[in-house]
Image (cartoon, helix red, strand yellow):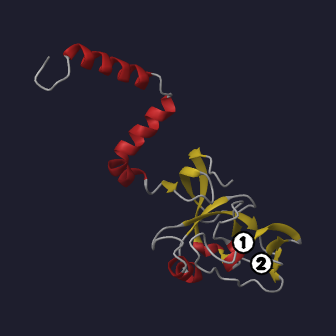
Amino acid sequence: MPKHGWPVKDLQMQLKSTFKAFKMLPLWTWLFVALILLLPTFTKVISPHFIINYTASLPVGIYFREPIKGKVLQRGDIVEISQEGKLGLYAGNYHILPKGYSFIKIVYGLPGDTYESSSGTLLLNGLPFGPILKSTSTGIPLPQQLPGEHTIPTDYILPLTPSQSSFDGRYYGSIPISFIKYRLHAVFTFRSEEL
């Protein structure tokens, strides 16, 4: 028996079975592990072109950033929204996102569409969209600022997500298109448990 207490043969068998298990992992797992290991170096190169979504509002993963300057947004576009104006205040006051992080939402409401709060539910163009919660999962009260019917003005959109616990237009209403910097395209995602 060697000094450290493990017979060499047992150690060799253990290493062989470990390597065999590693060989059976799918290729995407290896690519993901490589990405995580290289992320500190890689981030400086890819960050202007990609963003990572860590929240459960939309599938967690990597999204490609397409600048929207001069382009028309469509219903269903996934967008990156900067923390400007009331969004920055809400993000900090309600502990939604750290300062400097972007919101990732879907364009649901376009100029001319209507939305309103009715019995704790957001109605978009008269159809129920989803609940308006009173507080976050940690018990922090959420803004309830949608009394009455609102029409989305020109150069504004209503950002939402299918997630019932998403901090989106249900709480802050429509936002100026100028808050949106990028249209996003999913590159590699994991399904969010909530969706």
Q: Is 68 situated above or below 126?
A: above
Mark carried by residue 101 = none
From this viewpoint, which residue is outermost toward the left? 3
Between 139 and 114, the residue placed more toward the observer is: 139
From this viewpoint, which residue is outermost toward the right? 126
Q: Is residue 53 visible?
A: yes
Image coordinates of residue 38 in percent, x first then y, are 35, 44
- Of marks 1 and 2, which one's residue comes earlier in the chain? 2
Quick one: quadrant of the N terminus? Answer: top left
Amino acid type of the residue that numbered disc 2 sits on in the rendered structure: Ile
Q: Residue at x 79, y 86 (%)?
A: 147
Q: Estimate the spatial distance between the alpha carbons at disc 1 and disc 2, rounded to whole Å.
A: 7 Å
Q: Is 194 situated above or below 25?
A: below
Q: Is residue 72 visible?
A: no
Q: Which residue is mark 2?
A: 152
Q: Using a 10 Å C-alpha cutoff, classify the residue at mark 1 as few (fewer than 14 neighbours), some (14 to 19) or many (20 or more).
A: many
Q: In this image, 24 relative to 103: left or right?
A: left
Image coordinates of residue 25 in percent, x first then y, are 47, 27
Instruction: Kindly indicate whether the residue at mark 2 contacts the one at mark 1 (C-beta within 8 angstroms).
Output: yes
